Amino acid sequence: MEYTVLGKTGFKVSRLGIGTAEIGFEHMQTAAVSELLLFALNHGINLIDTARGYEQSEELIGKTVAHRRRDFILVTKCGYGEVEGKEFLPPWSKEKIAASVDQSLKKLRTDHIDIMLLHTCSKEILEKGEALEALLVAKEKGKIRFVGYSGDNEEAIYALSLPEIDVLEMSLNVTDQKNLEKVLPEAKAKNVGILAKRPLANCPWKDPTELSPSYAREYGAEYRKRFEQMQLKPEDFGIEKKDWPKFFFRFVLSFPEVHSVIVGTTKLEHLFKNIETLQEGPLEQSILQKVKEAFWKAEQNSASPWLAQG
């Protein structure tokens, strides 16, 4: 397994992290989640990404790998997903964020969260400062170790201007390259840890009816449109259609500024393939440039800018 230092956090993280949205949304059985996450940990993956809004994800992580807590960096998010018993509190208020932190700790069966991210809140919420202040209070109390933001575009740029932000989770893939322009260079300059989400772009090469769960079809609609407009063909890169997942993953690995690439899965065989792909490393520079040019050209021919997808 390849490791790198996650910016100013100092954490040594695996370049492949495991995302757990699917685990929660697909209501996996506890035994299957245990097998998947323990396989990841036993093969050197030491970053697990979740969120309060991923339904049962936090609870399943707590049930299955709390006994291995020292073996992984735990990333979760707050702001989306109801806080049980606190539904009456205003969204993004100091009280609701504080309650969300406490509920995450309980569900994850841990006494601290390594990285807590504000989950794609607006720039206005960031400017107001109440949500961030709640996380800083939790940090002072030892409930969380580092604070960050999950989001893109103008909001990400603003978040990076805040000295309290230690980690940024942003979208990056073949069909989502906007963050390469300003966000990634700015994060690197600030020594902010970078986590890349949505690297496989909800599989835009697939027929949407093949995707499960149904949210993946809706969430990936914009990526499917872009993929078609970019006119990328497997034969242009000397690969077959079945190799697109590997190609998309290696595209994101091609940017060393990205400390960990978060790939979600519910299938053990897919996780194993991701580990194998990591060993292949980044794409060749000539291929990387070809993909970047295809994105910029297609965006120029589009009716509106191709902003990063939150």
Image (cartoon, rainbow, N blue to C red):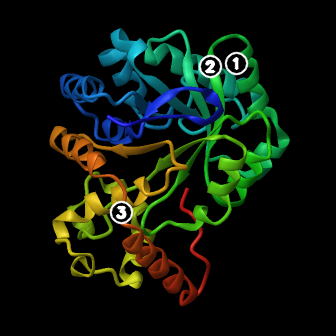
Q: In which quarter of the image is residue 289?
A: bottom left
Is residue 121 shown left or right of residue 85?
right
Q: Which residue is drawn at 44% across and 69% down?
A: 175
Is residue 307 shown left or right of residue 276?
right
On screen, residue 147 above or below 149: above
Front residue of 15/174: it is 15
Instruction: Identify the amino acid type marked 3.
Output: Leu
Q: Quadrant of the C terminus?
A: bottom right
- Foreground mark, 1 or 3, reads 3
Q: Position of residue 85 (x, y in %)?
A: 58, 21
Q: Where is residue 284 in the image (x, y as percent from the top left)?
A: 36, 66
Q: Earlier in the sequence, mark 2 or mark 3?
A: 2
Q: Which residue lies furthest to the bottom in this view?
A: 301
Q: Which residue is drawn at 84% across and 41% down?
A: 128
Return the residue at label 3. Answer: 283
Q: Earlier in the sequence, mark 1 or mark 3?
A: 1
Q: Quadrant of residue 3?
A: top left
Is residue 13 shown left or right of residue 287?
right
Instruction: Identify the amino acid type marked 1.
Output: Lys
Q: Is mark 3 on a helix, strand or loop?
A: loop
Question: Would you say the residues marked 1 and 2 are in contact, meaning their CB atoms lie under 8 Å apart?
Answer: yes
- For marks 2 and 3, give the CA distance: 36 Å
Q: Is mark 1 on a helix, strand or loop?
A: helix
Q: Is mark 2 on a helix, strand or loop?
A: strand
Instruction: Identify the amino acid type marked 2.
Output: Ile
Return the residue at label 2. Answer: 144
- For marks 1 and 2, give the CA distance: 5 Å
Return the residue at label 1. Answer: 139
Q: Quadrant of the N terminus?
A: top left
Q: Earlier in the sequence, mark 1 or mark 2?
A: 1
